[in-house]
Amino acid sequence: MDPTAASRSGNLSLSEHPECSEWQETPEGAVFHLAHMLLVLGFMGGSGVYGLLYMFSFLALGFLCCCLHAWSEPCAPDASAWPCALAVLCVAQALHVAHRARAVAFGGELQGLYARLFRRLGVSLAQFGEIVACSEDQIHTMEKDHFFAIEGKTPIDKLSVLLSGRVRVSVNGEFLHHIHPFQFLDSPEWDSLRPSEEGLFQVTLRADSRCRYVAWRRKKLYLLFAQHRYIARIFALLVRNDIADKLFSLNTAALDEKGFRYDLRLPSFCHGPQVERTGLVPPPRPSRNRKTTKPVESKS
């Protein structure tokens, strides 16, 4: 077989490939360089919904430019067929990601909840969609002076986050603190019970203004935690951080009969033994304004 004919048919091995007699003096066209620049930008895309949209959009443009550049070679149709097919696949994937992102879009209040609590912890929109679905996509309304919970009567059967308004927390008629938007309404009660336990509120929660909140039932939320351990860790972090904020916001701590200073909402004091059983008596505190004087000896 003639070697020249074999080289034309492309059957030569790599070692028998003819060497370049001279390099091409003119560079490739602008479309060729633009295609590779777009491909580089596309592969720099990150994760998440917006990262996928960024990546597939630039990849589609890059493969489209490759297709246009390969179209100038009429004798090699497969060189333009592959970039065109890849461009179509990238466009379809970008449309699918955009549709999925639109499907998990939320209203103004839930979007604010996501931006305030969950987005900064790395929760994706898809994961937040499962959290919202666990609450049955319902936002509850509580009018002014209505009670969310009454101490000793309301069972602890849900976990709620205040979206708007303000709620007053009191115990035995004494004011403790306020609950503001994007704070949990019942985080201490939720953290005080195990999944199999039941209990009652130890405080009274009353609305100071018209309030709106979202609530998750205990059983449904624990089922979600069993399926997604990451969401369970996120809720544990949010609940305990909310409890710390509430304790820090207390202006004056409650005092028991013995003079001990503690918070009534802590489970260890609500459900544990009373201070009177311990037999401990707080030491007397000397007054700063009191002047110490020596006792006067009586003359006998």
Image (cartoon, rainbow, N blue to C red):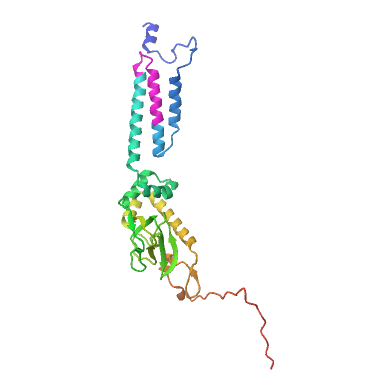
Where residue 31 appears, as percent x and y from the top left, is 43, 20
**Residue 64 magenta-drawn?**
yes
Q: How many marks?
A: 0
Q: Main secondary structure of the magenta part?
A: helix
Between residue 244 and residue 197, name the one nearer to us.
Answer: 244
Q: Is residue 134 above or below residue 28?
A: below
Residue 94 lies, with reference to residue 248, above or below; the image says above
Where does the image place residue 290, in percent across and percent down from the top left? 62, 77
Q: Furthest residue to the top? A: 2
Residue 69 seen in the figure: yes
Give the quarter of the figure containing the C terminus.
bottom right
Task: Determine if residue 217 is in view.
Answer: no
Residue 154, position as x, y percentages in the image: 33, 65
The answer to which of 229 and 15 lies nearer the viewer is: 229
Residue drawn at point x = 43 percent, y = 34 percent: 45
Residue 213 is inside the magenta segment: no
- Of residue 112 and residue 16, the one placed in the foreground of this image is 112
From the top left corner, tell me how far across and down residue 254 is, in percent.
Answer: 47, 69
Question: Which region of the structure is painted magenta?
Answer: 57-78
Residue furthest right as drawn:
299
Location of residue 263 with respect to 119 vertically, above or below: below
- Which residue is painted at 43% across and 54% down in the image? 238
Outermost residue toward the left? 136
Q: Is the N terminus in the top left, top right, bottom left or bottom right quadrant?
A: top left
Residue at image point 36% right, 19% down: 80
Q: Report which quarter residue 185 is drawn in.
A: bottom left
